[in-house]
Image (cartoon, helix red, strand yellow):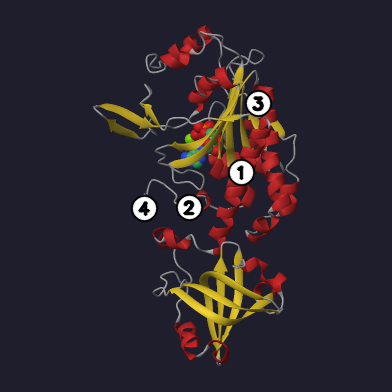
Amino acid sequence: MICRTSEISKQDGKEVTIRGWVYRQRILGDNVFLVIRDAFGIAQCVIKKDAVGEKMHKEASEIFIESSVVVSGTVKKDERAPGGAEIKATKLEVISRGEAFPIQKDLSEEYLLDVRHLWLRSRNMNLIMRARHHIVNYLREWLDSKEFFEIAPPMLTKAGGEGGADMFELEYFGDTASLTQSSQLYGEAMIFSLEKVYTLAPSFRAEKSRTRRHLTEFWHLEPEMAWHGQKENEEVQEQLLSYAIGKMVENHSDLLQGLGQDVEKMKKVKPPFARIMYDDAVEKVNELGGKMKHGNDPGTEDELLLAGAFDKPVFVKNYPKEIKAFYMREDPDHPGTVLNADLLVPGVGEIIGGSERIWDYNELMERMNQSKMNIKTYQWYIDLRKYGSVPHSGFGLGIERFIRYILNVEHIRDTIPFPRTMSRLEP
Ligand code: ATP
Ligand code: MG
């Protein structure tokens, strides 16, 4: 039976077989030490000539790292070995003897991106990709437990009348299509059937900004909820994020620690999150040394300053309506501002944008006309307000930004296997 590398210390004295890739090779006298990695960790094997024979011993001593192998032998506890045990090999089978591996020490970031298809085997990438899988699963798990339905939105859409600068356009049988920037409007259509829905899909944005938090293709989790105002919307966000973080701390703190994250810090991320009004946020940013003008969106630096002042995520609420999207409902209690909140976290800045949507037909038409929008392209969306409209709200969480926050990853590109940015479309 094949044993995982991470399990061998439980097999002291037993015969095991492991399989994987050569992570390190070292020759000490007549002994060859091979460290083998698989999806879950590494294990050390010692290959002695008298145990495996001359031919296998020679193969082991000439092997390149990243060759794929199957090793059988007896487990012996050994404090010096990684994981606290070592396999005394009786058999080594080289499945594919690799060529000299092109990734050695101290290579530039750019080169590592060029050989991303190989760099994904590195320990950090392995930990991040495993954690990513679990984070996404926990988000889905919470939504499922609250009776949200996952729906499948289109990625190809009719180019909007806005001609947005950050839209990818493509030729579509003589017409122009664009890659979706958000699935929200489709989510809104589905609440009239399913009430609470979410999409988990890529969004595409031709972002020209080279920042540590922008990709041109990112995964976007977008819940949309009938009968929910902005207050309930924020509560859903708090609970959803705290659940995923709590589960990561509870079940995968080894991954967090392996990546240098402070697990104690993440344990404290529990509802309620902090809340601040946009007007007060502008003042606070400037008190903290920023230079934010009222009526502007906070820049990255402003967001980091503000988020850094709280030890929990913070909702920034009620932005001026002029700087927010046409579908956000004006706050009757604070005219001129909308019922929205961006959620900011320390070290990353904005990870969620959310709002209550305009659900009244006339209000929507008025706002769209003010914003000089192409009514024809959005006719189907406007239609939703004609037949039994209901109060509703929703939000968009950038999966990669959330992962950056939970795992303390410096750059967004390392939270996704094959990052897409302005300067990178390969591999
Ligand atoms: P920013 O101001 O940082 O560009 P945004 O206001 O454009 O963000 P929204 O349109 O509200 O963002 O999108 C919702 C969420 O999607 C954001 O809070 C963020 O987590 C994520 N997101 C948006 N653009 C990107 C991007 N280019 N790369 C990665 N994630 C993104
Ligand atoms: Mg943006």
Instruction: Say what amino acid the circle numbered 3 marks.
Output: Asn
Residue 227 vs 317, above or below: the answer is above
Residue at 65 percent across and 66 percent down: it is 6
Residue matched to label 1: 137
Residue 371 vs 319, above or below: the answer is above
Quadrant for the C terminus, please. bottom left
Q: Which quarter of the picture shows residue 221?
A: top right
Residue matched to label 3: 233
Near mark 3 (Cα within 10 A), the count class, few <14, some 14-19 or many ≥20, is: many
Instruction: Say if disc 2 is inside 8 Å of ligand 1.
Output: no
Q: Which quarter of the picture shows residue 284?
A: top right
- Whichever of callouts 4 and 2 sits on the residue coming sooner in the sequence is 2
Q: Nearer the viewer, mark 2 or mark 3?
A: 2
Q: CA distance from mark 4 to mark 1?
A: 28 Å
Residue at 49 percent across and 91 percent down: it is 54
- Asked if disc 2 and disc 3 are in contact, CB closer than 8 Å, the reply is no
Residue matched to label 2: 417
Instruction: Say what amino acid the circle numbered 2 marks.
Output: Pro
Residue matched to label 4: 426
Instruction: Say what amino acid the circle numbered 1 marks.
Output: Asn
Q: CA distance from mark 2 to mark 3?
A: 31 Å
Q: Which quarter of the picture shows residue 72?
A: bottom right
Near mark 2 (Cα within 10 A), the count class, few <14, some 14-19 or many ≥20, is: some
Front-most of 378 and 5? 5
Q: Secondary structure at mark 1?
A: helix
- Asked if disc 3 and disc 1 are in contact, CB closer than 8 Å, the reply is no
Q: Position of residue 143 (x, y in %)?
A: 64, 34
